[in-house]
Image (cartoon, rainbow, N blue to C red):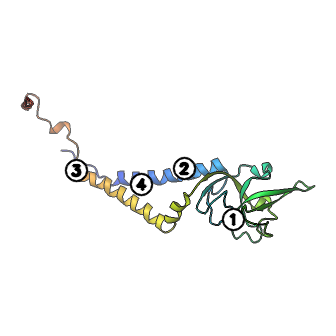
Amino acid sequence: MEKPRSKMPVAVRDIVIVVAGVAIVWLGLRLAFDTNNPFYIVSSGSMIPTLEVNDILMVRNGGSWDDLKVGDIIVFNRPDGEDRVIVHRVIEIDERGDGERIVRTKGDANPASIPGTDYPIREDNYIGRVVYVMQGAGIIAKVISPPVNYIIIAVILVILFFTKMGKKKGGPPASQSDQPPTGQQSPPPPPPPSV
């Protein structure tokens, strides 16, 4: 009788496939949107009513700095200290004689541009232009922010692992050797009852 194979390698393989799949999707999104992080969550009301707190933004760079126009909503590192990520609307683009562009932004809900936050924005401050908004979806991301998201991922991987290990206890499927030898046939099943 053949000894059943261990399910351990199958469970490990499945976990590796899940982790690799997540990594491939993340890298694919980074390449498609040409930015290190294509997703941002609105955390202040400076763009109300256009953007609400907890909206998720999909941001794309892809050389869009040279194509920016007044009215675009962009994501950038705050010029004064680069200590915060800001999402505001472009209200002015200053084309310098040396080819450099300086951008001024303003939050839709703000009365005016804020020096050091809204200008002067240069290309090295720029992250990308907002291409899509998922309204309110950021609340889910906040609920599952670190360390909760890591705990959820760990629980899913543990469930996957034990599910694969649990299938081992059910026993292997019947093989040819478990069938009665030729010539010894099992009796036919009884006919179904008539109504």
State left or right for residue 171 relative to residue 151. Answer: left
- In this rendering, the label closer to the viewer, 2 or 1: 1
Q: Is residue 62 above or below residue 89?
A: above
Name which of mark 1 and mark 3 comes first in the sequence: 1
Residue that mark 4 sits on: 15
Residue in the picture at 29% in, 52% down: 6
Residue that mark 2 sits on: 25
- Residue 112, percent across and down? 79, 66
Badge 3 vs badge 2, beta-carbon distance below 8 Å: no
Please state which of residues 39 and 135 is positioned toward the viewer in this rendering: 135
Report the Cα–Cα distance between label 3 and label 2: 34 Å
Name which of mark 3 and mark 4 comes first in the sequence: 4
Report the Cα–Cα distance between label 1 and label 3: 58 Å
Residue that mark 3 sits on: 170
Location of residue 101 by image quarter: bottom right
The secondary structure type at the circle numbered 3 is loop
Badge 2 vs badge 1, beta-carbon distance below 8 Å: no
Report the Cα–Cα distance between label 4 and label 1: 42 Å
Report the Cα–Cα distance between label 4 and label 2: 16 Å
- Residue 166, percent across and down? 27, 55
Marking on residue 46 = 1
